[in-house]
Each structure stands twice: as C-alpha cells, then as structure tokens.
Image: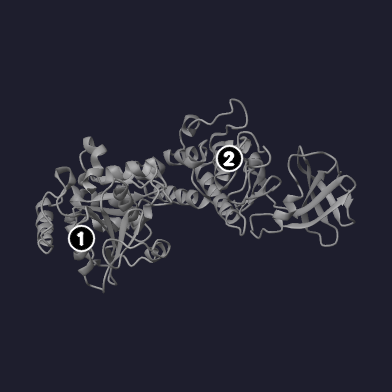
Amino acid sequence: MLNAGDVLEGKYRIIRLLGQGGWGHVYLAENLKVGNRWAVKEIETAQEFRVNFLAEPEILKKLNHSSLPRIIDIFRSGNFLYIIEDYFEGIGLKEVIGTREMCTEDNAIHWAKQLCEILIYLHGLEPNPIIYRDMKPGNIIIDRENQVRLIDFGIAREFKRGGSSDTTFIGTRGYAAPEQFSVDGQSDERTDIYGLGATLYHVVTGANPGQPPFEMVPVRQLNPVISEGLEHFISRCVQADPGKRYQGAAEALEALNALETLESIEPGGRSGSTLKTIIGTVAGSLLRRDRDSFRKERDSLRKERPSVWREGINPGRGLIGTVVIAVGGASRGTGCTHTAIAAAAFLAGKGFKTALLELNENPVYYTIQEEYPEAGLLEGSFRHSGVDFYSQGPAGSNDMLIKVIRAGYHYLVLDLGVVCRTGAKGIFEKTPRYDEMVRADLTILAAGAAVWQLKDLAPYLREPAAGSWRFAFRTPEMYLFHKINKEIPHTCLPIPFAPAPFKLTPETEGFYTKMLEPVLPPLENKKKWSVFSK
C-alpha cells in the first residue's frame, strides 16, 4: 500500500487514498511536472483474481466520452500493476446516498438520464459493444455541476453477439443482474439496465439492495413521495427476466424523458392524475361525436367501391367478399408498417387468404421482396409467410386496390402510412389515403404514447369517422398508456414488443386476436378458422 508523498515513476506523487477493494487501491496523485491530478489504480498482480484486469486498460483506450475516464499511463512496479486514469472531482453517489440531502426524485431522474446516455455510448461501440456490468453507487461520481461520471471498468467486457456464456460469475450482490451469476448466463445491454434500476432504487429509498433482506420491494412502500411513474420505471429495470426489462438504454431514456415531461405538465406536478391538460378537450369531443355524420360519410365513400363491399362483411357471419383492414399512422415512426405486416402475417397464419397492399411508399417492402421473390396470386406481387404483397400503381391510381379486392382474398390489409398532415398554415389536411380509413371494415390507427406525440393524435380524435376506429399505441411505458387509455373513450391497445413481424409471440398473438376481433370468426369457432381458406 502506498503512502502520501510516495512518488511513482518519478512523476506521480501520491496525495491520498481514494478507495479500495478486494483487487487493490485507488489513490489521488499529482503529476510533479505539470501539476494536474490523476487517479492511480494499484493492482497486486501476485494475487489471483477472477477478472483479467489487463482488459480494463484495453477497454479504456477505446473510450472517448466526457463522463468516462481516459487512460493516461500503465506500468508495473514490483508485484503491482499501476493504471493512471482521469480523476473526476466530486462526491461519490454512495456518499450522497448516505447524507440523503440530494436524493430527490428530480435528481434521481436527472442522474438516470445521464447514465442512460453513457450506456447508449458504451453499447453502441463498434465492432463490439462494451457491457459495464458493475453499475452501483460506489462507481458513480457527482461533480459540482450535478453531472454524472462513471468510473471503474474493472469487470467490463466486450460483448460479441452469439458468443458463449460469461466466463466468470462476478458482480456486486444486490446490483448485479441474475444472469451474472447463472451457469449459462450471458450478460448483455439489459444487464446494465438492471444495475441502473438497482442503483436508482438505492437512491430513492436509501435501502441498499446488497444488504439484508437482499430484496427490492416497490419503492413507494419505503418512500411514498416517489411518483408511480418512477416506481414503475425502477420495477421494470430490475426484472429477473431480461426480456421483461427495457431492452436497451435508448428505450430506458425514452421512458425517463416521457416520465419527466408528463410530470412537468400535469396539474399539481407529480400529484396530478390525468392527461387532461393535453387531450381533455379532445376526449370530450369524442364523447359528443356525431355518429350519424360518421355513418353518412362512411356509406357515401363505400358506394364508390365494387359490389364486393356489403354491409355486414364479417367471417363470423360467413365470409362474404374481401374484408379490408386499414392501418394508418398518426405520425411517422409509430409502427404503422410493422403493425400492418404483423396483422397480415397473423391472418395468413390462421389459414386465411391474405394480401397486403402498401400505399405508403415504404422502402422496407423492396427489402422484403429482394429476400423473398416468390410470386403471389396476381402479377406484380410477391409472397412471404403466406402473405401476398402488392404495391400501389401510379400516384392517384387505385387500379391495384380494385384488382386485389376482386382477386378473391379473404382479407386485405392496407398500409396507409401517415394519412393526415399539418399544412404550411398549421391546418390539418387529409391525404387521399384518408378515405381508405373510412371505407375499411376495420380501421387501426397506430400512434405513439409519449406525451409529446399526443398532439399528433388529437386531430384524428376529432374526426367523426374515428368513432369506429381502434387505436394501437407503440409505447415502451405501460404507465403512460394506462393514463392515456383513461382519457380516450375508445378501444386502445398497447403494441407488444416484437422485432420480427413475421414471427408472432404469444403476446402478439393475443394483441392481434383482440385488435382484429370485429372481423374475425366468433371465439367459439377459433379452432375452425382454417376452414375459411378452403
């Protein structure tokens, strides 16, 4: 162990001990020539550790982030390895928690957002992401500007997808995710999400998850002033099953941003209970919507269609003609195309003759066609997973739409994309594709559930035709969805996480069964759905 005044390599004078662990010590040192200060990590190489500490300098060499330490020098002296790194002046989060003075919800969210940004950087490194694996208060510094610094990469590792399980069981009890101690466990980005949640838990409750009783209860049981939203965020982070956590730091950051925005606009701050400040008047207009006007508009538009369009088209009453399902988007990035493809795949998987017509000009369809060039029923189509894909003809033409309807499919799913837009003068304008939303037998509007996306949804809710629509919310945060659902007197469902639209999970099966219920056979005939494909 070094003492104050000792000099290393003739240029680093030890000032004081900063901390210590089972692997060694960390000192504050001054460069005698320049006068600046550095952190010196001392590791006794004669001891055997489960971690290769030579890997830490290799990782630090690859980092270039203001909140992460740079490696300045590395050398051996006797039985010790010395790593010279940036010294971040501030107070350790462990000490902050001990005093409790700064452990407010605002600060907790502020720190968590910065940690998410750091993790986004680490997990986004190429060719291999860096998994930190040791998120805990003892490795976090809060500087004078209330900015977060993350230190100690002693057990971090490069992550190679498809690799074997971790080679060693390591981590700090209480903060380490279960997979870090599993025989076949593989740490990945979600491992750091667990550590983030455990750290926040300690911040807002003062209860160390690494001490008896070694469990994390809902945070409001220990600190009732914490909001339901932050409690939910932490609970999702620390799920034992990685699949139930936020799937990455970007998703977690989005949830924190939405939570922070929601709390800032609600009446009374965090004690507010509704979103009426944003959509309250819109919800009121929905309750007063003119259903007769909607029916007249719908019937007028349907008259323009071929004779296959009849009242009561529903396979539950006998499959008559082609059932058209229109999927539109309230704004870009809400999952309209993904929802349309998955809905078509769901129907094809049940044995129905299904087509999907894209009126969205989305390049993703060209990618699918290149990979699956098998021809569909009509010329100009391709088939994948039992779904025949079609593209629109010349701009303004509906020839392909009519051809597909007359081809004899049981279901036709329309990918309409964003069907309304705000014009140059701020006027809400309908695109020609909007008419298909009204003509369809079932209309689904994909929307975002983040607070800032509700302004895009509001104009649609004012439309008389919206009385029969179903709303699918692309949301990472069920807490926000439930709040929105209370304000919209309508059928609203959260789109489950499903990265591959052609591979339906039990969750997505349930979602599309419920979403498409009005145009599906009765539930008691579920086992006989395949007869309709004959």
Mark 1 or mark 2: whose residue is earlier in sequence:
2
Q: Is residue 202 left or right of residue 518?
A: right
Q: Where residue 214 sits: x, y (%)?
A: 59, 28
| Label at residue 258 | none
Q: Where residue 178 sits: x, y (%)?
A: 58, 35
Query: Residue flagged by tag 2: what amino acid is it?
Result: Thr
Q: Residues within 10 Å of mark 1 (few under 14, many from 20)?
A: few
Return the residue nearer the eye: 406 or 475. Answer: 406
Return the residue nearer the eye: 66 or 414. Answer: 414
Write the residue at 70% across / 55% down: 60
Residue 187 position (above or below residue 290): above
Distance between the Cα atoms at labels 1 and 2?
59 Å
Q: Is residue 428 left or right of residue 101?
A: left
Furthest residue to the top? 213
Q: Residues within 10 Å of mark 2 (few under 14, many from 20)?
A: many
Query: Residue flagged by tag 1: what amino acid is it?
Result: Ala
Q: Is residue 177 left or right of residue 277?
A: right
| Label at residue 407 | 1
Return the residue nearer the eye: 312 or 124. Answer: 312
Q: Nearer the viewer, mark 1 or mark 2?
A: 1
Local secondary structure at mark 1: loop
Contact between marks 1 and 2 (CB within 8 A): the answer is no
Q: Which residue is mark 2?
A: 199
Q: Where residue 24 sits: x, y (%)?
A: 79, 41
Which quadrant is the N terminus positioned in? top right
Q: Where residue 500 sits: x, y (%)?
A: 42, 52
Furthest residue to the bottom? 394
Local secondary structure at mark 2: helix
Q: How is the image coloured?
A: one colour
Write the residue at 29% across / 47% down: 276
Write the residue at 68% across / 49% down: 151
